[in-house]
Amino acid sequence: MNAVPLPFVRTVEVTIDGRTVRVPEGTTIINACKTIGIDTPTLCYLENLTPVNVCRVCVVEVEGSRVLVPACSRPVDPGMVIHTDSDRVRHSRKLVFELLGSSVDLSTAEPRFKADMEKYGAAPERLAPSGHSDHGAPATVQQPVKIDNDLYVRDYSKCVLCYKCVEACGTDAQHTFAIAVAGRGFGATISTEFDTDLPDSACVYCGNCIGVCPTGALMFKTEHDMRAAGTWDESRQTATDTICPYCGVGCTLSLHVQDNTIVKVTSPNDHDVTEGHLCIKGRFGWQFVQNR
Amino acid sequence: MFGAGGGTSAYQEIEDTDLIILWGSNARETHPIFFHHLLKGKKNGARMYAIDPRRTSSVAWADVWLGLEVGSDVALANTIGREIIAAGLCNTAFIERATTGFDAYKAAVESYTLERGEQLTSVKADVLREMAHAYARADRAQICWTLGITEHHNAVDNVFAIINLSLLTGHVGRWGSGLVPLRGQNNVQGGGDMGAIPNKFVGGQDVEDPALRATFEREYGTSVPDTRGWHLSQMFEAMEHGELKTVFVLGENPMQSEADAKRTRRLLEGLEHLVVQDIFLTKTADVAHVVLPAAASWCESEGTVTSSERRVQRVRKALHPPGQAKDDLEILTLLAKKLGKDWGAPTAAEVWQEVQRLSPWHGGMSYERLEAENGLQWPCPTLDHPGSPTLHTRLWSDPVEGARAGFQVVHHSPPVDTLTDEFPLRLTTGRRLDSFNTGVQTGGYTSPLRHGERIEVSPEDAVRLGVVAGEVVRVVSRRGAIVAPIKIDPGLRAGLTFMTMHFPDEVETNILTIDAVDPKSGTAEFKAAAIRIEKLGVPETVGAGGAR
């Protein structure tokens, strides 16, 4: 092989839920957990992005640490003793889910998100007893869907401020910097510069923000329209991996097809050509095959 | 290169390199996901030089921009080469062990002093010198290029000039050091690898080699012509002379994609028999005698394509083709049957087995492995071979395995379409992020970035010509004239203009371009036409090109 010789890496030994694990130095707690099959709930974390530590869903208890620590970003130390399923951890995760679920419309969140909420017994309604249903955000955060172009929509009633879109648009992939977090505290939102419509912003419509959004706040317009029309049905969809028909880079496209029609396009996060990211042509340029 | 028609490096190598030269490539817009890898390289500390007449969105990421004159690439490369030699920065051990022809090269570039280089390229001598030293001194360096190098009348010379630099410095065949031609279409690499070029069988095997020809004759049970075929430009020549009367076009739209569109139309319309196999009724299909409706190769049928890093990857059927459209493979086998050859009804996987059997590059790439390993990079001769992210590592074994790599003497040759008082402006062409070639595919979706075709001019020329943004003007070359609205682009220098061929139905840019063809590659000089811009007498409302 012609790969660069790997530098010598020390390994460290840690204890996770009573089991001893040996992992390379610098491994994060979440990846150490993965090596022994412990699944950690996450929200703002994604393999292809830099951890930003904002959601606190992945917290674990580390002996000797005053506060719970985020598993997504904290590297293991030698001899670290980690508890991923203590009462304190379960309670914290549950509360975080409840806070999010009570303030945001999670009706289109990733299935995994809902499963995790159930797993931790989160009951958001106890924090937002009125004005909240499965299909609507509380009045305090409810706002109209932003539809300002034909490719994708932004529904910030569904935004949990996980920062993933900002990272994908910024230094973790696209380097376009069309969006950032604007405002503070309860007024914080994801925004284009001066909150302009997308066509007046720096956006180049790569859709890499949609690719990383966990709640459906950012959504293909095709999906948004089909949901509105009541025709969106994931049980009737297939996902087929193929190669983009445009330039010679050879990006893998996962074509999500319903009724012989492409309804959205993603790319696998673990593919070393794309790492989940595409450009406008790969993400949105497929309509020509169905102008039948 | 060096007998293998493919880039030498995996995309990931650019993340680990120390110096990046992006030459004649606006990869930020034309190869955006490769540019993600490049940006990682920058983040990891690589220094970046961009060589382009235009200050593009790719150039914006460079540490240094070399804004050369269109078509002065050989002069620039030779100047860099001469400076590396003069400064004593050659990789002498590599040159002596792994290359041939150095002395002739050294003598040939002797006249390309920094001063002459500046004269020919308009790039300041100290910038040329700085890049030469940086490239030669870097531990690892990559040169990446696209059509800015290859769409010239001396395309192959341009490529040789770049290869020479890599040989001079040993920046090839090592992880992070290499030559990266970025292919413009998803299977340009694969088409050539599969033998869809005039001089090669599958796997880069020369048709003029009698032993290889014998192998293929045995396999196919038929005789194979002992001379290479025509490339595209030679085909048009042959149409001109009446030697070529029947043409079968698969998945191309030459009516709109070829330079000098008027001539192309005359020749295609003059054919006795034109068959077009396409997923659309293109402008070329419009004038065909027979149109064979095909399935889209990337989503309505099974098979493989090969990317710019020589990676063979699977394409899969996700949709059923509409109406009577058939898989390309099925159309060809049915056609063969009509012509008296029964090839049966092979699947794409069965055809691939033939590739594995006949191509030394692909022997180890079974469909199972292509599925399991996210594709494989050739050469991959055997089932236990891991594939080859980096090509030509053999140049670093001592002694070199196989043939040495040869320096090629090449000289500056300015664009064919000369600038005169009558045609004082240089028109260069390219692509924009959201569109592709003649727009047959990208025309299918609504892009918020799309503003129709415009002729982009520098602010200086706009003032000189007295034109404003959006004003519709007449653009005239020696071959024809079109009308298009003006866009003012501060990334262009005075004297330079830019257009794309994305909207040929509204603005037929290729009326203007010249079919001055590289004799070796058959590529036309799309990058350099001479034009003038005329104000239209009567003010026109903006309509042509649908510009805002």
Image (cartoon, grey):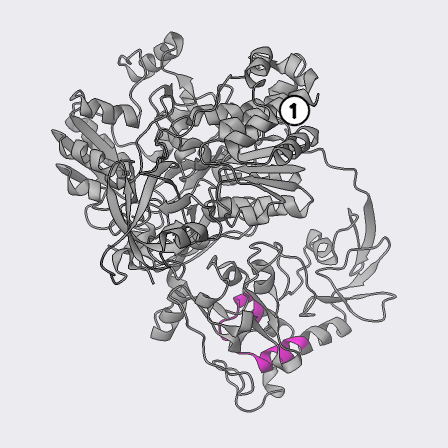
Is B30 placed above or below A82 here?
Answer: above
What residue is rendered at 59% in x and 64% in y?
A: A166
Judge the density around disc 1: few (<14), some (14-19), many (≥20) Cα neighbours within 10 Å: many
Question: Would you name the residue on which mark 1 appears?
Answer: B84
Residue A263 visible in the displayed image: yes
The residue nearer to you, when weighing B404 against B377, is: B404
Secondary structure mostly seen in magenta is helix
Residue A263 falls in which quadrant of the image? bottom left
**Magenta region, residue range:** A96-114
Is B79 placed above or below A6 here?
Answer: above
Is A86 placed above or below B299 here?
Answer: below
Q: Is residue B90 left or right of residue B267?
A: right
What residue is rendered at 58% in x and 13% in y?
A: B107
| Magenta-colored stretch includes residue A174 | no
The residue nearer to you, when weighing A118 against B513, is: B513
Residue positioned most to the top: B210
Determine the secondary structure under disc 1.
Answer: helix
* Amino acid tagged 1: Ile
The residue nearer to you, when weighing A35 against B289, is: B289
The chain ID associated with circle 1 is B
Residue A50's spot in the image, x, y percent? 66, 57
Residue A71's spot in the image, x, y percent? 73, 62
